[in-house]
Amino acid sequence: MGLGNIGLPVAVHVSKIYPHTLGYDISEKAVDNVKKHGDVKETCINASTELEYADIYVIAVNTWYRNGYPDMSAVEDCTKRASELNSAALICFESTLTKGTARALAKKYNLENVAVCPHRWWKQEEDKYGVVQLRVLGSLNKESQKKAQEFYDSLGIPIHVVDSLELAELSKLVENTYYYLRIAYAEELKLLCDENDLNFDALHAAVNTKWNVDLPEARDGIGGECLPKDIRFLMNTCSSMPLLQGAITADIRYQAKGAEIFSSNSGNESCDA
């Protein structure tokens, strides 16, 4: 469910193991894109704007941070549609969720089998960090965990099991927020170097000679759909997180300074759904 940057690669991979895979999206443009996609023609995937009965639904649609709040509306819409067709199906959430979303949706739509297995797909190195890589899995109950493990095992996707849906949800937010913090620190150091007539590239190379340091580059600010959203999702779970707010402030300051772009790549980003 969802045939965008994340959902389409997932559907293509799943269809190689399950010949009756159906890709679903409310966008006719996305469905048409699947039909024209070269890789898809070599598999058994079909695509439609009409959702059908299934034993397993994989939800890989966008989530947003809008008007100061997390927006899970696309995920909920998918959940509702799947529950109306088969409430006993295994629902696998691969979208990025705020803590408690999966459990709340399971209760609201009387779902029996729910798992959260956030994607870690990265467009820049899809061959290494594509659909098949170590993932975190949390489940609603033991039966859900059993079914989800069997499903991901069949896809050749290794999993690290945690004991709740919430831990799996938080793991994704923490991963991307950790990357955000590292980038923001590099940006602060770049400004420090500029203000003191020092070469940031030389500093960057020097500190990264230490075995436990991996300072990112300072590029053109933290952008894209993922990192700016996910750090705010994490902040939404706690009344006060001054370190995270400081990182956001640091990035805003850095971008306002119009810092030099150090790479031909776009802004620092970790791809998300």
Image (spheres, rainbow, N blue to C red):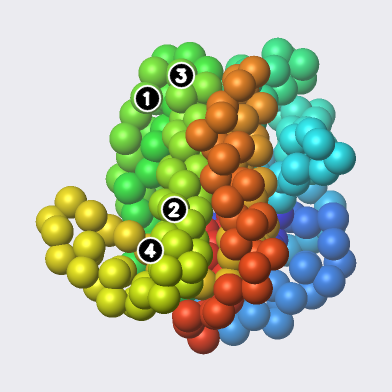
The secondary structure type at the circle numbered 1 is: loop
The answer to the question of whether label 2 and label 3 lie on touching residues, with beta carbons closer than 8 A, is no
Q: Quadrant of residue 163?
A: top left
Q: Earlier in the sequence, mark 2 or mark 1?
A: 1
Q: CA distance from mark 3 to mark 4?
A: 32 Å
In the image, is residue 218 above or below residue 228?
below
The answer to the question of whether label 2 and label 1 lie on touching residues, with beta carbons closer than 8 A, is no
Q: Earlier in the sequence, mark 1 or mark 4?
A: 1
Q: CA distance from mark 4 to mark 2?
A: 9 Å
Q: Quadrant of residue 112?
A: top right
Disc 2 versus disc 1: nearer the observer: 2
Q: Mark 2: which amino acid?
A: Tyr
The answer to the question of whether label 3 and label 1 lie on touching residues, with beta carbons closer than 8 A, is yes
Residue ID for mark 3: 164
Q: Position of residue 42 (x, y in %)?
A: 53, 78
Q: CA distance from mark 3 to mark 1?
A: 6 Å
Residue beneath the point at 38% across and 63% down? 216
In the image, is residue 106 above or below residue 130?
above
Q: CA distance from mark 2 to mark 3?
A: 32 Å
Judged left or right of residue 76, residue 111 is left
Residue beneath the point at 54% across and 79% down? 261
Q: Residues within 10 Å of mark 2 (few under 14, many from 20)?
A: some
Residue ID for mark 2: 185
The answer to the question of whether label 4 and label 2 lie on touching residues, with beta carbons closer than 8 A, is no
Q: Mark 3: which amino acid?
A: Ser
Q: Residues within 10 Å of mark 3 (few under 14, many from 20)?
A: some
Q: Mark 4: which amino acid?
A: Pro
Which numbered marker is on residue 134?
none
Q: CA distance from mark 1 to mark 4?
A: 29 Å
Residue beneath the point at 66% across and 27% down? 236
Q: Position of residue 10 (x, y in %)?
A: 54, 58
Which numbered marker is on residue 216?
4
